[in-house]
Image: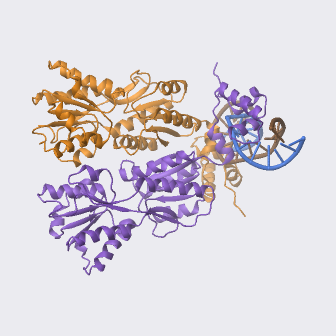
Chain colours: A purple, B orange, C blue, D brown
Amino acid sequence: MEKHTITIYDVAREAAVSMATVSRVVNGNPNVKPATRKKVLEVIDRLDYRPNAVARGLASKKTTTVGVIIPDVTNVYFSSLARGIDDVATMYKYNIILANSDGNPQKELLVLNTLLAKQVDGIIYMGNNISPELRSQFSRSKTPIVLAGSIDDKEEMGSVHINYVAAVEEAVADLLNHGNQRVAFISGPLSEPINGEDRLKGYKNVLAKNGIDFDPELVFETDYSYRAGEILWPAIVSAGATAAFVGDDELAAGVLNGAQDAGVKVPEEFELITSNNSKITEIVRPKMSSITQPLYDIGAVSMRYLTKMMNKEEMTEKTVELPYGFIKRSTTK
Amino acid sequence: MEKHTITIYDVAREAAVSMATVSRVVNGNPNVKPATRKKVLEVIDRLDYRPNAVARGLASKKTTTVGVIIPDVTNVYFSSLARGIDDVATMYKYNIILANSDGNPQKELLVLNTLLAKQVDGIIYMGNNISPELRSQFSRSKTPIVLAGSIDDKEEMGSVHINYVAAVEEAVADLLNHGNQRVAFISGPLSEPINGEDRLKGYKNVLAKNGIDFDPELVFETDYSYRAGEILWPAIVSAGATAAFVGDDELAAGVLNGAQDAGVKVPEEFELITSNNSKITEIVRPKMSSITQPLYDIGAVSMRYLTKMMNKEEMTEKTVELPYGFIKRSTTK
DNA sequence: ATGAAAGCGCTAACAT
DNA sequence: ATGTTAGCGCTTTCAT
């Protein structure tokens, strides 16, 4: 005999109460006499009853799960955010559905749709380029959404991140102060607002502040891989750069090793500052100086922000800006 | 006026058919006249109808989501597996609920329960130490489970991984062939079967095969962090080791840098082989020789295996063993 | 090929 | 404090 899955009904029958009462004790509703609560709890335990979250979700219209759109879990930058997200999600009794998008607009759209179909209570989006279609889908859906570690150039959506403009200004200023006249700006796609808007703006700002002309030859647009950085050295040399700001750690590690493999002394002959202070910065030699971002916290705060939205609390600010820092290691003088 | 969410009922009414028919076209049931199918599809499009996956799940008892228990997404080893899992999950129309456990038995139990409450169709477990309680919960539940990149010393559950014993044998044999008489065995907790059983067995096997006595002083049990490796050097020196097999890449990077920071020439004075061939192996200098494991594939195959279990297909083997390899870089002669 | 109707397991008024 | 009952939105026999 196949023993059927036991339901709230079974518990009610065994405990000689109504389903409503069982539901109340399961949900911690205070309107239950201690004696009955105890009785119900015993039956639940005896029958090893586990509430069916799907049925619950259908009846209550809340699934206690949130969707997380991530470019690639394999990338420490994103996985650090994801960890922060999951930890506070757990804290608030939520689970996360994690979906990789590769930053591909098509996949993002697809993923968003299945997430909405699954009735997630909220969504956290990571990615640096919100396509127009995605944006319109976002605004059309009434599901709360927050951007983690990403910026919305249109500033329409809730988001948490650091002040990238100011962080880069500070980093490049340091390089300038060491006497470098030609500082390279190395980043991922400039089409991504975080690079093309914020970081580049910070770079131009300090240059202007120091009376140095902006030279397009010093900006290197590439992809985020280690390899991309490694092969960049010849180009950097011919541009005459003596220092560089790099927008990604893996990329920076590539640049660093590329330079050293070419016999260049770091930081004596070439200085470098990277952006994310991930583990890699301490694993390479010399260890890399870096802007510090509270990655875990960005994820955690994003999720916390989302819980507030899901509770329909009033949000004072659309954007929450977390503090960044700067750690000097050995790739800068 | 609040416009209510549109349901299958709305579509049925607008298309002048029954809900059953709408359900059929949505689910690709062939028993629908092309004309009606077309009509329904048009209405679906016009109304922008999206099937509610929760309701579907309740009615069909399948949620098309699988749970993934992961020690820490932030660790590339695991995130690589996760990526493989997600990719094939997507391929088969599943989503994954990702939950971090920190390898903590308590959390694992908690997570497993909420996963089961959410009625996931299957579970993929990563972790190196299945507690007795967890094991009993696993076997009690009728939800399919597979272990990814983990071994089950009891061999009761489906799992996919490489042959750790053989891989270590080969790695250490190489070190021995280079004339090293004292090869250190450095790994995470020996309480984890993958270390204490498999890897250590491989280590002992080659030693025996080469007529070398096993010396407990040469086995270093520590945790998986970079830092743990970095501070290990003095101990390695006093044990008189001239080479080492290391069970984790971050740990290995630490050992490598610790040695070099102490002025030791690698590989001339000290050789090292690591285990996971993650990005880190190429980022440190010298680049590390490593056992190669198809991490992404292990994840992918695990998920594929799970889909088969969920379809109740007959599995010939409980365990699927993927091929490992070996890549010589510059930390070995 | 299509429809009618009975659930799936639970929550949330509403009533008592 | 507790019970009754009507859904939640869909799938799935069973008829026709």
Q: Quadrant of residue B88?
A: top left
Q: Horizontally, is A200 left or right of A4 in the view?
A: left
Q: Percent position (x, y) of residue B29?
A: 58, 41
Residue A162 at x, y percent in the picture: 42, 63
Question: Toward the viewer: A102 or B217?
Answer: B217
Q: Judge by depth and name the residue closer to the eye, B61 or B298.
A: B298
Establish if B249 lies above or below B181.
below
Residue drawn at point x = 73 percent, y = 33 percent = A37
Query: Is B81 or B250 nearer to us in this picture?
Result: B250
Q: Quadrant of the N terminus of chain B?
A: bottom right
Total of numbered circles in the picture? 0
Determine the residue located farthest toward the bottom in the rendered image.
Answer: A211
The image shows residue A92 at horizontal and vertical percentages of 57, 47
Say which quadrant the C terminus of chain B sits in. top left
State whether residue B240 appears in this view.
yes
Q: Is residue B319 above or below residue A308?
A: above
From the viewer's side, name the closer residue of B88 and B258.
Answer: B258
Which residue sits at x=50%, y=38%?
A: B66
**Which quadrant would residue A105 be assigned to in this image?**
bottom left
Please say if A217 is above or below A149. Answer: below
Q: Residue at x 23, y 51 (%)?
A: A284
**Image coords of residue A192 (percent x, y):** 38, 65
Can you see residue A100?
no
